[in-house]
Amino acid sequence: MLDVAILLPSFLNGVTTGAVYALIALGLTLIYGVLHIINFAHGAALMVALYAVYFLKNRAGIDPYLALPLVVAAMFALGYGLQRVVINRAGHGKDENILLVTLGLAIVLENLALLFFKSDTRTIETAYTLTTVAVGPATIALTKLVAFAGALAAATVLLWVVHRTDLGRAIRAVAKETQGARLMGIDVEHVYAMSFGIGLACVGAAACFLLPAYYVNPQVGSGFVLVAFTIVVLGGMGSFAGALLGGLLIGIVESLGGLFLGESLGQIGIFAIFIAVLLFRPQGLLGARP
Amino acid sequence: MRDLVTIAAFAIAVAVLSSVLRSGVWTTFLMMALYAALLAQAWNLLGGYGGQFSFGHALFFGTGAYVQVLAQTQAGLNAWIALACAVASAAVVGTGVGALSFRYGLRGSYFALVTLAFAEVFRILAVTVGFTGGGVGVMLPLRESAANLQFASRQGAILVVLGFVVAGLLVTAWLRRSRFGAWLQAVRDNEDAARALGVDPLRVKLGAITLSAGFMGAGGAFYVQVFQYLDPNIAFGPATSVESLVAAIVGGIGTLWGPVLGALVLHALAEFTRNLFGDAPGLNMVIYGVVLILIVLFVPRGLSGVGRHVRAAWRPGRAG
């Protein structure tokens, strides 16, 4: 059982899936870090982005990887608009209201998809869908390798924005001390909306890397959102490096768990880690003590 | 005292209504609205009065439901005894989850996420282990008689769930007046200040989650008795958790009648849109979601807050 020829493909599979998880979780952790809300519409947003990629490929013939700038920009605009027009107004400064609104948004988005696209599970065909690459003794699908590299590149861009630009400085200032940031002349509402927009843009990028090796249906997001929560908590809420590390770790745990325990019970490893981290180290692996 | 009178009036009114209604549509509506109210009340005990927002109340619902069905099919117990077991085991699971999470000081988002995760773990376990029937689910054999807690007419089921709703109202009313309730609300409003005054937050929160889980377990048991089928997704899936908390928040958390009102309004809304757009899948839920967002936008303190506001505005000589 503990043969490299079996373990390595499973490990590679986990790392590549984990990178996409990490990208989704980065968006979630950014939104949490700045707005202090758990965005329950995150999975629904992923679903929307996946449909966008699907229709761009099937109707317009645009390759998923080439569609990236389009989908990322559209998701950013969607996030910015939602935060400005709906979430911010409905919040009234109360956490439970913001939570209900994101929940309501998720219900609306998922059922709009159900209404227009029915509950069919759809996949796309590309020239490279079945291409595989040899990595040492293992072979891995090319799409997964591209997803891995792309997710890491997107994460790098995000980290660069947050740590090296004026916008990033404003985001970090608002995350740390909202009132202080406002007094320094930062437009807090704008930063909120930018953060939500960037959070959904991450999801848009993830969708482009995901779909060539995955599928889309109206419920596809709910599976990811729980995993993304786990990663965010594991890495420490609001910690970017933590989300990146947590994503890779969860991907590997899921893949190896599936190998040893079977598909359905394998998932339990994720939640066992989740609960253990929440109980014993709620600040996360890389988070600072609250 | 005034609470007791209104609760009694409510109980009598619903009981009379259940015997007057002839149409199956309306009796089913009444039963499902009361059932939704029970779940919302259960959530409100912990979320509204204890300030602990759970996202995994399906955990207690599913525990109650599985114990209810398995105690009858596997252990051969009578349905009423199974009901007692279901409520007790849900309460025990509640105490367990509470002991784990409150002991380590989980609050706010962290508590919400840990309850969500516990419900997921139970869902995966229910799929995997053998005695729950796995993903295929379990059936409760049809044996209609009051002794088996299965009723040929809807009225019997309505009276049972009404009993639970009234019990929930009485417990809530007790929370508003009793010393324990005062401790609980003190912990909700400021845990550190409450501790400084000698309240033991851990014990108080444990009491609240145990009560809340027990009522949720009763809801699960009732579900199985009526629908006679259970699978891991129905039992531990997120839908029930969401349903219970949305009804409570929309109605107004930390109030006596809010959860009942919220459940009634949301259930009516869901039924109405389903009848209107039943043939287009998803459209009814789109409207449900939009109305939910609108309620939060315009009635942020819950529907029962509106009633109070209107009453205050109409009372003469108390302007403003």
Image: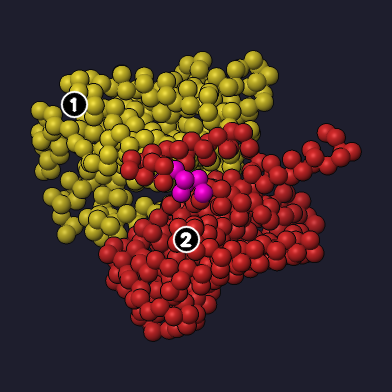
Chain colours: A yellow, B red
On residue B23, the disc is 2
Q: Nearer the viewer, mark 2 or mark 1?
A: 2
User: Residue drawn 63% across and 27% down?
Assistant: A178
Q: Nearer the viewer, residue B75 or A268?
A: B75
On residue A58, the disc is 1
**On the rendered structure, is B136 left or right of B184?**
left
Dot 2 and dot 1 residues touching (CB under 8 Å): no
| SS at circle 2 | loop
Quadrant that contains the C terminus of chain B: top right
Quadrant that contains the N terminus of chain B: bottom right
Spot occupied by residue A282 in the image (x, y as percentages of width and height): 52, 49
Residue B209 on the magenta segment: no
What's under tag 2, amino acid-wise? Answer: Ser
Spot occupied by residue B241 in the image (x, y as percentages of width and height): 48, 54
Instruction: Please report the bounds of the magenta region as a residue range.
Output: B268-274
**On the rendered structure, is B74 left or right of B35?**
left
Q: Residues within 10 Å of mark 1 (few under 14, many from 20)?
A: some
Whether residue B291 appears in this view of the structure is yes
On residue B280, the disc is none
Q: Nearer the viewer, residue A89 or A160?
A: A89
Query: Label 2, label 1: how many angstroms apart (C-alpha)?
Result: 49 Å
Q: Indicate the chain on which mark 1 is placed.
A: A
User: Residue drawn 53% across and 28% down?
Assistant: A86
Residue B271 on the magenta segment: yes
Magenta region, main secondary structure: helix
Q: Residues within 10 Å of mark 2 (few under 14, many from 20)?
A: few
Whether residue B107 appears in this view of the structure is no
**On the rendered structure, is B272 left or right of A131?**
right
